[in-house]
Amino acid sequence: MLRFPANGAQRASTSRSAHLTILAITLAFAAVLGATNPTAATAATGVKVVVIVGPVESNTASYIRNARRYATQARSYGATVVEIYSPNATWARVKAAAQGASLVIYLGHGNGSPSPYGAFSRYTKDGFGLNASAGQGNNRKNYGEYYIRTGIKLAPNAVVILNRLCYASGNSEWGSANPTRTVARQRVDNYGAGFLRAGARAVFADGITDASYILYGLFRTNRSIGAIFTSSPSWVGAYDFTFGSVRTPGFTAWMAPKAAGRYYRSVVGNLGLTAATFRVH
C-alpha cells in the first residue's frame, strides 16, 4: 500500500544537445505566441474537463479539496467540468465521464513501474487507483494502462495531469529511497504510455506541487506544453533533462528534479503542442 504524509506530499522519486534543442523550441513558442491570450476564455467554452480523486485513506478529504479548486479554476475559464470523487470514483463512472475529455486531472494513489511490488502488469500499473465499488470508502482497485488505452478515447490533443501521485513523475513512495535516474525515467515513460495511447498528447506529473499553473497555461495562454512546464513556480532547471520516449516513440519526456534524485515533476508527450491547439474542440 502506498503511504502519504499528513500534508499529502510524496518523496520524489539524452543527451545534453537534445535537451537544449527542446528548450530552444519551447522558448521560441513562448516568445512568438505570447504569454497570454485575451480570447482564451471564449475559446475554452465547451472544453470538457474531468477531475478525479481516488481513495487515499486519511488524505482523501485533502485531495478532494485540491481537486475542487482545480474544478473551480477550469470553470472560471469557461470549461465544462465533471467531478468524480471517492467513495464514488468507480472505473465505470470514470470511464464514461472521460470519453472525449480534453483535460483529465487525477489525484490519488499511483501504482507505477518499476516498483518494489513485483513485475510490471498492464492491468494494475500506471493508471488510476479507484473505488472497487461505490460508497465503500477505501476499497481501492488499481486500473492499469490496459484499461486506460482500451477503455478511454480522449479528445484530439488532450492533456492529462497526474497530481500528488507516487511514481508518475519518477518519484518513490514517501519514506523510500530516491530512485536512480534510470528507474525514474522508466517510471515517467511507463506512466504516460497508456494515456498517450488513449489520445492524450501530453501527460504532466506533479508529485507534490500545485498544478494550477498548468490550467492557467492551457486556458489563458498560447504557450507550448514545454513552455507551460517551465512556467511552474517550482521550476528548477539545474537538474532537468529530456529523452525520447521508449514506450511511445515520437514523443519526448522532460524531467525537472528539484535536486539530484528528487524527481517531483515531469511531462511526456508533444512538447511543441500549443495551448491554442489544445483548446480546439
Image: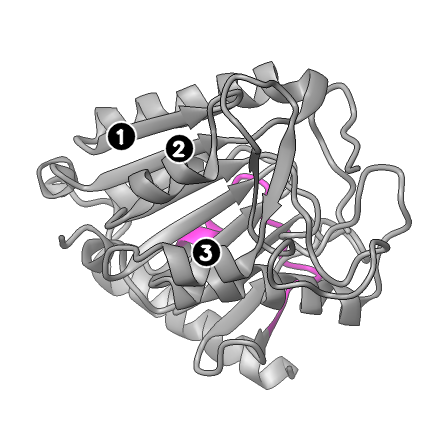
Residue 239 in magenta stretch: yes
| Residue neighbourhood size for the residue with mark 1, other residues' Cα within 10 Å, grouped as few (<14), some (14–19), many (≥20) | many
Q: What residue is pinned by disc 2? A: 51
Calculate the distance from the C-alpha at mark 1 to the C-alpha at mark 2. 7 Å
Drawn side of residue 5 relative to residue 63, left or right:
right
Is residue 226 visible in the rendered image? The answer is: no
Q: Residues within 10 Å of mark 3 (few under 14, many from 20)?
A: many
Position above or below: 117 against 133? below
Q: Earlier in the sequence, mark 2 or mark 3?
A: 2
> Foreground: 155 or 27?
155
Residue 211 x, y percent position in the rendering: 49, 37
Name the residue tied to disc 3: 148
Assign a secondary structure to mark 1: strand
Depth check, mark 2 against mark 3: the one in front is 3
Q: Are marks 1 and 2 in contact (CB under 8 Å)?
A: yes
Q: How far apart in space, not on screen, are marks 3 and 1 (Cα)?
A: 20 Å
Q: Amino acid at mark 1?
A: Val
What's the residue at 61%, 18% (across, down)? 137
Amino acid at dot 2: Val
Residue 81: where, in percent of width, then height?
Answer: 26, 30
How is the model colour-coded? one colour
Q: Is residue 71 above or below residue 40?
A: above
At 61% from the left and 63% from the top, the residue drawn is: 122
Q: Amino acid at mark 3?
A: Ile
- SS class of the residue under badge 3? helix
| Prevailing secondary structure class for the magenta stretch in the rendered image | loop
Mark 3 and mark 1 lie on one chain; the one further toward the N terminus is 1
Mark 2 in CB contact with mark 3 (< 8 angstroms)? no
Residues in magenta? Answer: 228-242
Residue 81 got which mark?
1
Few, some or many residues within 10 Å of mark 2 (<14, 14–19, 20+): many
Horizontal side, residue 240 vs residue 277: left or right:
right
